[in-house]
Image (cartoon, rainbow, N blue to C red):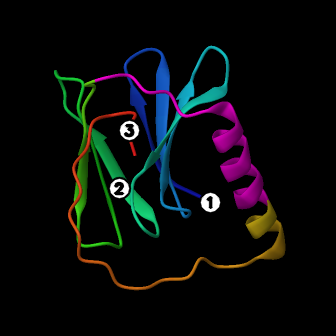
Amino acid sequence: MLKEAIFWGKNYLVAGSDCGHVFIWNRETDKVVQLLSGDTHIVNSLDHHPELPILACSGIDNTIKIFSPDVYSPTPQDEINRTISLNQRLLQNNQDFDISSADITIIFPLGED
């Protein structure tokens, strides 16, 4: 289930999810073009810098993750498809994700896990 969605420029829509991922869609093709690890559990909040290509997200973990383009490393399409399929199955089965504690702060470039 999506938590929050924001527009990133003219071409992209970015959304946090209950699965802990940040999904980036190309608005022209309606395809997920990037999948980022945003939180161990749920990505509740996202925002982007008004001038720089920087994205921030947070969730249940006690971390805020900052993504910025360093080296573009696209998520393989099969990984995107697996994640979407898993989310669809969990939604159909009405299952919740396991929630546990985490206290690690991770900052990494946009496109890398």
For marks 3 and 1 on the same chain, the one whose residue lies earlier in the sequence? 1
Q: Residue at x 16, y 21 (%)?
A: 51
For marks 3 and 2 on the same chain, the one whose residue lies earlier in the sequence? 2
| Residue at image mark 2 | 45
**Residue 53 in the figure: left or right of residue 80:** left
Q: Residue at x 20, y 63 (%)?
A: 105
Magenta stretch: helix, strand or loop mostly: helix
Q: How many marks?
A: 3
Q: Residues within 10 Å of mark 2 (few under 14, many from 20)?
A: many
Distance from the alpha carbon under mark 3 to that under mark 2: 20 Å
Question: What stretch of residues is rendered in magenta?
Answer: 71-88
Circle 1: residue type: Met
Distance from the alpha carbon under mark 3 to that under mark 1: 23 Å
| Residue at image mark 1 | 1
**Residue 61 pos. (x, y %):** 31, 72
Q: Secondary structure at mark 3?
A: loop
Q: Magenta span has 72?
A: yes
